[in-house]
Image: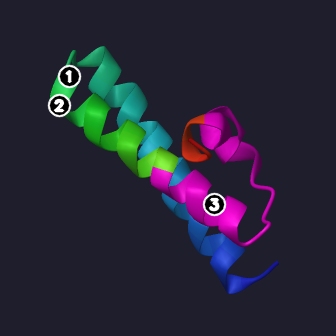
Amino acid sequence: MSELTLALQTRAQDAIASLHQATIDDDELLVHVRLGELNSLARTANEHDLNIAELAPYRSAATV
């Protein structure tokens, strides 16, 4: 596993956990921030032809 893949996976897992907590807390701003972060991470993964399972739900938004 490359260093980039590992970094993207770790950041995605952290952002997803934060997104879930923000949703529970009804923190709309943080939800928006985390969705943007996940879309950005998915875009980076796509640009490097990396298939990262955690980012699959955000892949379509990243290609727009």
Mark 2 touching mark 1, by CB under 8 A? yes
Give whichever of discs 1 and 3 has the lower sequence position.
3
Instruction: Tell me if residue 61 can be seen.
Output: yes
The disc at residue 16 is: none
Figure check: 52 above or below 59 = below
* 1 or 3: mark nearer the eye: 1
Mark 2 closeness class: few <14, some 14–19, many ≥20 residues within 10 Å: few
Residue at mark 1: 28
What segment is highlighted magenta in the picture?
40-60
Identity of the residue drawn at 53% across and 57% down: 41
The disc at residue 9 is: 3
Which amino acid, by three-letter code, is at mark 3? Gln
Q: Residue furthest bottom?
A: 3
Q: Nearer the viewer, residue 11 or 33?
A: 33
Where residue 25 appears, x then y in whole percent?
Answer: 22, 19
Where residue 56 appears, x then y in whole percent?
Answer: 71, 40
Identity of the residue drawn at 33% across and 19% down: 23
Figure check: 27 above or below 12 = above
Identity of the residue drawn at 67% across and 44% down: 54
Q: Secondary structure at mark 2?
A: helix
Q: Quadrant of residue 1?
A: bottom right
Residue at mark 2: 29
Q: Secondary structure at mark 1?
A: helix
Instruction: Tell me if residue 14 can be seen.
Output: no
Figure check: 23 above or below 3 = above
